[in-house]
Image (cartoon, grey):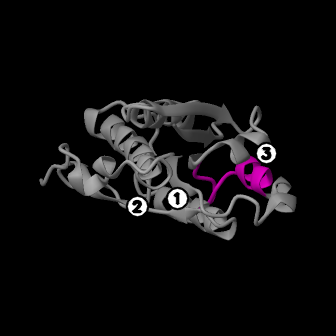
Amino acid sequence: MGRVLVLYYSKDGSTKRMAEYVAEGASEIPKTEVRVRSVEEADRSDIFWCDGIAVGSPTHLGTVSAKMKQFWEDLLPDWQKVDGKFGCAFSSEGGWGGGAELACQSILTILMNFGFLVFGVTDYSARQFTTHYGATQAGEPRERREIDSCRRLGRRLSEWVAVYCDGRADMHPLKASYIRNF
């Protein structure tokens, strides 16, 4: 059974809401156990537990929040002990164009430094709405395309975990029936 951790920091609730939708998407893949934790309640055992992780942070000055960065800095003694897990990113921002893709890239860089295998999502959740670097959102997700983007990210994470950790080739994203071309 694959294990997915959705780890987030949220100042005003927007990133927390995204995390909930990411977890919903991750739960769509049968035989996947999903755990949602804020950085205030998570610890290193959560990182060791998971096969895949979705990390979410509000965009602060075009990068991750200080609390999210501190969580990973505190994990440095365990560097090289979590190599080979899957990882992806999501971020909320104050307004469109506020740097959420930069924050996602910062999260992916952190994960790569720990040896996580990171990915983007190549398909669309709506016309001209992608999750290439991670799910991004201005404020709280309210529109269907915004919610679907978060769910799509979580589902893709669970698909990769199912394929590579559980040996379930039928879960490979190229075999998924929901891919849409807009």
Q: Amino acid at mark 3?
A: Arg
According to the image, label 2 marks what residue?
A: 120
C-alpha distance separating marks 3 and 2: 25 Å
Residue numbers of the magenta segment: 58-72
> From what the image shows, is residue 99 above or below residue 8?
below
**In front: mark 1 or mark 2?**
2
Instruction: Tell me where residue 55 appears, x and y as whole percent.
Output: 58, 48
Asked if the residue at tag 2 contacts the one at tag 1, i.e. Cβ–Cβ closer than 8 Å, the answer is no
Q: Is 47 placed left or right of 179 in the picture?
A: right
Residue at figure coordinates x 40%, y 52% from the top left? 163
Q: Nearer the viewer, residue 46 or 54?
A: 46
* Mark 3 / mark 1, whichever is N-terminal: 3
Q: Secondary structure at mark 2?
A: loop
Q: Which quarter of the picture shows residue 107? A: bottom right
| Residue ranking furthest to the left | 182
Q: Which residue is mark 3?
A: 44
Picture quadrant where residue 3 is located: top right
> Could you tell me how far apart the alpha carbons at marks 3 and 1 are, in whole angstroms?
21 Å
Residue at numbered disc 1:
104
Q: Residue at x 64, y 55 (%)?
A: 64
Residue drawn at 46 percent across, 56 percent down: 164
First in sequence: mark 3 or mark 2? Answer: 3
Does residue 76 sit above or below 51 in this rendering? below
